[in-house]
Image (spheres, grey):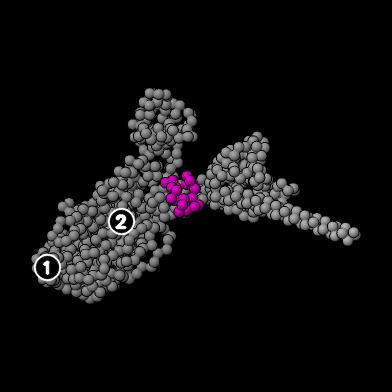
Amino acid sequence: MKQNKKKWWIIGISALIIVLIAGGVTFFVLNKSADKQAKNAAEEFTNQLAAQKYTQLGDQVTSKSLKDLGFTKKEMEEKYETIFNGLGVKNIKVSNLNVTPGENSHSYQLTYDLNMQTSLGKLKTQNYKSTISKEDDAWKVDWLPALIFPGMVKDDKVRLLTDEAKRGDIVDRNQKKLATIGNFNEAGIVPEKLGEGDEKTKNIMAISQKLDVPAEDINHALEQKWVQADSFVPIKTILTGDLKESPGLTYAQKELRTYPLNQATAHLIGYVGEVSAEDIEKNPKLNVGDIIGKTGLERYFDKKLRGKNGGEIKIINDRTKEESSLQKVAKKDGETVQLTIDAAVQKKAFDSLGSEAGAVTMINPQNGDLLALVSTPSYNANQMAAGISASDYKKYSEDKRTPFLARYATRYAPGSTFKTITAGIGLDLGVTKPDKIRHIDGLKWQKDSSWGNYFVTRVHDKPTVNMTDALVYSDNIYFAQEGLEIGKDRLTAGLKKFDFNQEFNLPFSMEPAQISNDGLNTDILLADTSYGQGELLMSPVQQAVAYTAIANGGKMVYPKLAAGEKQLAAKQAIKAESANLVKDALVKTVSDPAGTAHKLASDHRIAAKTGTAELKQKQGEDGLENGFLYAFDADNPNYLMLGMIENVKGRGGSSLVIEKLKPVIDSMYLKN
């Protein structure tokens, strides 16, 4: 009997132990499950924050915590959107996320850190804490305003005070401003002053006509969500002219980027504009509303010019009048960019080209300073910076004269100006000699019958021609024959000394100069190349740089546009003796009454070469002609000009270029 009792006692104890173990295991499993669910809740909440999916935060927090604060889910979500988007918050990173048991089994302690970037830059690490509670069988975060920014309470507001950096000026070599900040009038409408019904419609139509803004655009502006009856609604920036009067129309002062030379420097300086979504994607440091360089030097030097905005983010309680600073950054104004450009020369060259499609490059052949880079036709850079209308932009983009094209950086066949390079190479090799005579009959020539119907032509029927004659009269046949004697390999080697197929270190895009598409593989191509045709392609800038060797004792200087920028040392492209012989011939091209550049004759010893480049598919066809002129002072070579005008055929050819650009050369002596 005792044994049975003992047996049942052992069984009872064992059963109790099993129950206790099972209970403990169940309790452990349940606790582990709660731990995991609480951590998942914390991760879900912070993941939505990091992804800036503010409209999904409401489902991750307890309804009780919102109710206790007097918030709805939507109000809480909108508060995040308003504050974070208003501050330009991005790149939110979560770190040190910890979920630990609370004081009782119904809650957990939550802590985490956030790093983020605002429109003022990187914000210092923010430390957050709250609790996680169980609600409707789900663990959720207990929300409080301090989860927006630590320390915030219900009545707090977040305000961003911006101290905008001043964009740096772009100035010429004499400190004259080429891009700066100016004050303009902005035309706007106060809705309550327009009247109602038909009167309102009539007044909008009147404003539309006076400002040359479509009524549809005005109505669209007035329908924006933020517009109130007494709001000033901007419609158009007034760059020039009188301020029109009309019911409802008023004006305000506005600071805007302005370009004093406007169209004369538009291609070079470019213009600024508000960032696009694509701009921000390329550079995440940019924020909506930022003004950046869109084209030209404004774009190339944008970081230097733009500087860095400053400001302060404050947490303010209007009820208690308490405030604290969350982030404070001092602004850094943009730097001034000084160019080698001479504003007076730039303006003179632009005005001289007038309505022509053309370009002028002016360079100092002794040091490489670019004194002018002009392209016509041009566009209104001030209008672009102020915000050009779609219709006005369309006029530019559809203009067959391509006003957005920077012709000084566009490649063309150089024509007869290039003969100076062939002469220099020939002199270096001993093929070309000052006293060497070529006997040429007639106005056309071909090497032999293998050329078929192809002939090289010239303008002057001169039976005996030396190098000077060939430059003075611009004889294509002479240089075609010289090129054939030089040969393709030696001519190619000589041209490479002028940096064909090489890029220059300049702050704008320009394809390298080209000798040919695929080598000088035929005698015809070799002959044509020798007098500046064939498949040669050079921009006016590249031509001007190459020709500095003629003015500078055979040394080709590298171009420089920004003052203080490093540049490569000048290179000896041809011998000094060869360069001086060519220079003397170019002086005679001006001084000789029969010379092609004689119209440039003055009290100064000017060296010059004219040229035309024919644009046609094959000989015998009519094609366009571009006219060229390059000139420099033979005694004091502090300038070298390369001018080009498109489509001069039937309008005087290269003589038209001289007529248009002689005032530019004359102005170089008025300055001294």
Relative horizontal placement of residue 626, taking residue 127 as reference (left or right):
left
- Identify the amino acid type marked 1: Gly
Residue that appears at 25% across and 70% down = 519
Residue that appears at 41% across and 55% down = 300
* Crowding near the residue tagged with mark 1, few <14, some 14–19, many ≥20 C-alpha atoms within 10 Å: few
Q: What stretch is highlighted in magenta?
A: 273-290
Q: For the residue labelled by badge 2, is the local secondary structure a helix, a strand or a loop?
A: helix
Q: Which label number is shown at residue 452? A: 1
Q: For the residue labelled by badge 1, is the local secondary structure a helix, a strand or a loop?
A: loop
CB under 8 Å between discs 1 and 2: no
Residue 331 visible in the shown view: no
Q: Does the magenta stretch include residue 281?
A: yes
Residue 564 visible in the shown view: yes
Task: Name the residue at the front extreme.
Answer: 1
Tally of marks: 2
Q: Please state the horizontal and vertical placement of residue 369, each as a whole percent of the image.
A: 36, 60
Q: Does the magenta stretch include residue 231?
A: no
Q: Please state the horizontal and vertical placement of residue 47, each as a whole percent of the image.
A: 58, 51
Vertically, is 23 above or below 239?
below
Q: Mark 2 points at which residue?
A: 408
Q: Please state the horizontal and vertical placement of residue 358, each as a whole percent of the image.
A: 26, 53
Task: Name the residue at the bottom extreme.
Answer: 430
